[in-house]
Image: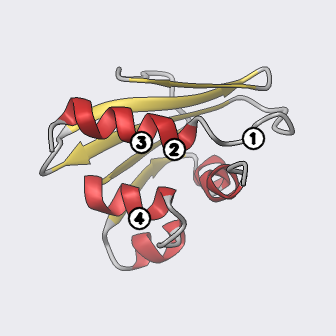
């Protein structure tokens, strides 16, 4: 799988999230390692969600993992905290804001 294919897939999954109740600004950068290696960011700003294939220098947190790990997290198959414990996900930056990724994932419209 190429980075472009993975980004398109993961963007589709994250764009299903309901961010209307999030009042604070959140900016996450994802550094994907291994297959489909690349960088993208997710930003919640003024109740809208943005997912773009660029670096975000003023990010709150950065997540570093494989495409497979992020796919499992986005699908709700792996808890992000467990992924950190298992060393499948590395987190840098504001941990309080990083923890909000879980609620963002869980907000996917069913």
The percent position of residue 16, horizontal first and vertical second, equals: 63, 40
| Residue reaching furthest to the front | 110
Query: Marks 4 and 2: in contact by CB < 8 Å?
Result: no
Horizontal side of 10 relative to 99 (left or right) equals left
Q: Nearer the viewer, residue 18 or 39?
A: 18
The percent position of residue 78, horizontal first and vertical second, equals: 47, 72
Q: In the rendered image, which quarter contains the N terminus?
A: top left
State the separation of the CA atoms marked 1 and 2: 11 Å
Residue pictured at 68% horizontal, 50% vertical: 108
Q: According to the image, label 3 marks what residue?
A: 10
State the separation of the CA atoms marked 3 and 4: 11 Å
What element does badge 3 sit on? helix
State the separation of the CA atoms marked 4 and 1: 19 Å
Q: Nearer the viewer, residue 43 or 17?
A: 17
Query: Marks 3 and 2: in contact by CB < 8 Å?
Result: yes
The percent position of residue 74, horizontal first and vertical second, equals: 49, 56
Circle nearer the N terminus (1, 2): 2
Circle nearer the N terminus (2, 4): 2
The percent position of residue 92, horizontal first and vertical second, equals: 43, 49
State the separation of the CA atoms marked 2 and 4: 11 Å
**Residue 17 found in image quarter:** top right
Q: Is residue 4 above or below residue 37?
A: above
What element does badge 1 sit on? loop
Circle nearer the N terminus (3, 4): 3
Q: According to the image, label 2 marks what residue?
A: 13
Specify the label residue 8 is tagged with.
none
State the separation of the CA atoms marked 3 and 1: 15 Å
Q: According to the image, label 4 marks what residue?
A: 72
Q: According to the image, label 1 marks what residue?
A: 18
């Amino acid at each position: 799988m190429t980075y472009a294919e993975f980004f398109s897939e993961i963007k589709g999954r994250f764009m299903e999230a309901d961010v209307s109740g999030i009042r604070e600004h959140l900016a996450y950068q994802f550094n994907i390692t291994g297959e489909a290696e690349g960088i993208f960011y997710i930003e919640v700003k003024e109740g809208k969600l943005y997912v773009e294939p660029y670096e975000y220098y003023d990010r709150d947190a950065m997540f570093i993992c494989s495409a497979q790990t992020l796919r499992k997290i986005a699908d709700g198959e792996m808890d992000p905290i467990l992924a950190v414990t298992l060393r499948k996900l590395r987190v840098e930056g504001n941990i309080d804001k990083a923890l909000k990724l879980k609620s963002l994932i869980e907000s996917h419209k069913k």
